[in-house]
Image (tube, grey):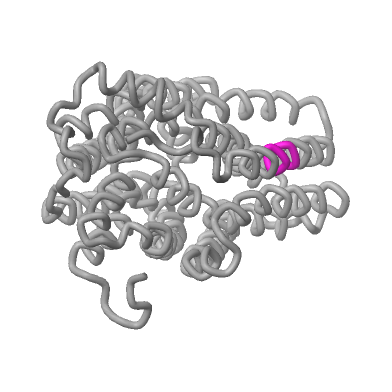
Amino acid sequence: MLPKDSLPPRPIFKYYIYVATAWGGFHVPVNVLMFRSRGLSFTEIGLVVAAGSAVTLLAEIPSGYAADRLGRRNSLLLSAGLMTSGSLVFALAGTFPAFVLAQATFVLGISFRSGTSGAWLYDTLSEMDREDDYAHVSGRGQTALLVVMGVTSVAGGYLGQIDYGLAYLATAATTAISFLAALTFREPSPTDDDNDNLDIETIRSVITEELTQPRLRDAVIGLALFFGVATTANSVLVQPLSVGAGVPEAQIGWLYATFTGVGAAVSYVTGWVEEQLGTEHTLVVAPFLVAVALGAGGVVTLAVVPGFVVMRGLQRLVKPLSGQLINDELSSVGRATALSVIALVYSVVGIPLRVAVGRATDVFASETILFGLAGLLIVAGAYLGVRMSTTRGDPQAQPSD
C-alpha cells in the first residue's frame, strides 16, 4: 500500500490535480436556468440533453479504442480540450443549434476521459508495482474531485446571479488546468508485450472473450443496475423530492455541496473500507443499504434527504471499489476499450431507467417510485451476492492471458 502519512509519488500527485480539475462544475447548479434565460423551451432543453446522451453512446467504444491506439495521455488531453471548448461555446451560445453543439462537444470530451483515466492510473501503478493500490488512489482522487465540486457548485450559483455565462467560463478555466496537468503525464508502458499490435481483431477479442468471463460479466450486470438506479435518482428525483421535503429552492446549491462533502469523506476512506470489509463484500452490501435508505424516504417524507445523502455517499464508495475489481479482471491490452464498453453498458441500462422513472413520476406518487427503485437495488445486491460467490475461485472466471 502507498504510505498513508507521506506525500504521494509525483505521478500520483499529478493525477490528483488532473482528477480534481477535470470536471469544473461551476455550471452544474445553473445550466437549466441559463438555457431558459437565453430563450430555450423545455422541449429544446430536453433535446439538448438527449443530444449529449446520443454522443455518449456513439462515442464510448471509439473513444476507448482511440485511447488504446493513441495512448492514454493523448486521450486525456483531447478530453480536457473538448470540455474546455464546449464550456466556452456554452458561455457564448444563444441559439438552440449552438447549445446542441456545445453539449455534444462537452460530452464528447467526457467520453474520451471515460475509462481512460482509470486505465492510465492502473497501468501507471503497475509500473510502480503498486496496482493493488488502485482503489486507494482512485478513492483519494475522487475525494479531491468532490472537494473541488463542493466549492464550485456553491460559487457557480453566485456567479450565475451575475451572469450565467460566467459559470461556464469558470468551468472552462478549471478544465484548462486539467489539460495542463495531463500534459505533464508520462504514457505508461503496457504490462503486456503485444499492446503495439492492438487492432480490430484484438478489440473484438476484448469484447467477446474478456468481457464475457463469468466473474467480470456478472459484476458488470449487477453494478450496471446499481449505478443505473443511483444516477436516475440523482438526475430525476433529488431536486423535486428534496424541495417537497422542505428544502428551499434557493438552498439546493448548498444541498448539493453537502452531498459532495459527504461523498468526499466517504471516498477518502475507500482504502480503509476495502481493507476492513473487502471489495466484494462491500459491493454486495451497498445496494441493500441504499435500498433501505430510499425505502425509508418512501415511508417518512423527512427521511428523503438523508436517504439521498446515503445513496450519494455509497455511490462514491462503490465507484473506485468496482474499478479495482474490474481492472483486476482485465489485461492491459485493450483495457481502455474494455472499460469504455462497460461504461456503455452502464449507460444502456441507465437511460431507459431515467425515461421510465421520469414518466412514472408524472403518474405515481413519489413513495411508489422510491419503493420501486429500492426493489431494483435489492435485485442488484442479491444478483451480485449470488453470482460473485458462485464465480469466486472458478478457473473459468479468471481473466485470460
Q: Position of residue 38 (x, y in %)?
A: 41, 32
Q: Which residue lies furthest to the bottom in this view?
A: 5
Q: Can residue 250 be seen in this view?
A: no
Q: Residue at x 82, y 29 (%)?
A: 364
Looking at the rendered image, the quarter that the N terminus falls into is bottom left
Image side of residue 72 versus residue 47, left or right: left
379 falls in the magenta region: yes
Q: Is residue 68 above or below residue 291?
A: above
Toward the front, the furthest residue is 395
Q: In which quarter of the image is residue 202?
A: top left
- Percent across and percent down for residue 155 are 41, 61
**Which residue is found at the position 68% from the left and 24% from the top?**
356
Residue stretch rendered in magenta on the structure? 378-383
Question: In which quadrant is the C terminus drawn?
Answer: top left
Point 28% across, 52% down: residue = 121
Does residue 353 appear in the picture of this structure? yes
Q: Seen in the image, is 299 located left or right of residue 191?
A: right
Task: Report the number of numbered marks.
Answer: 0
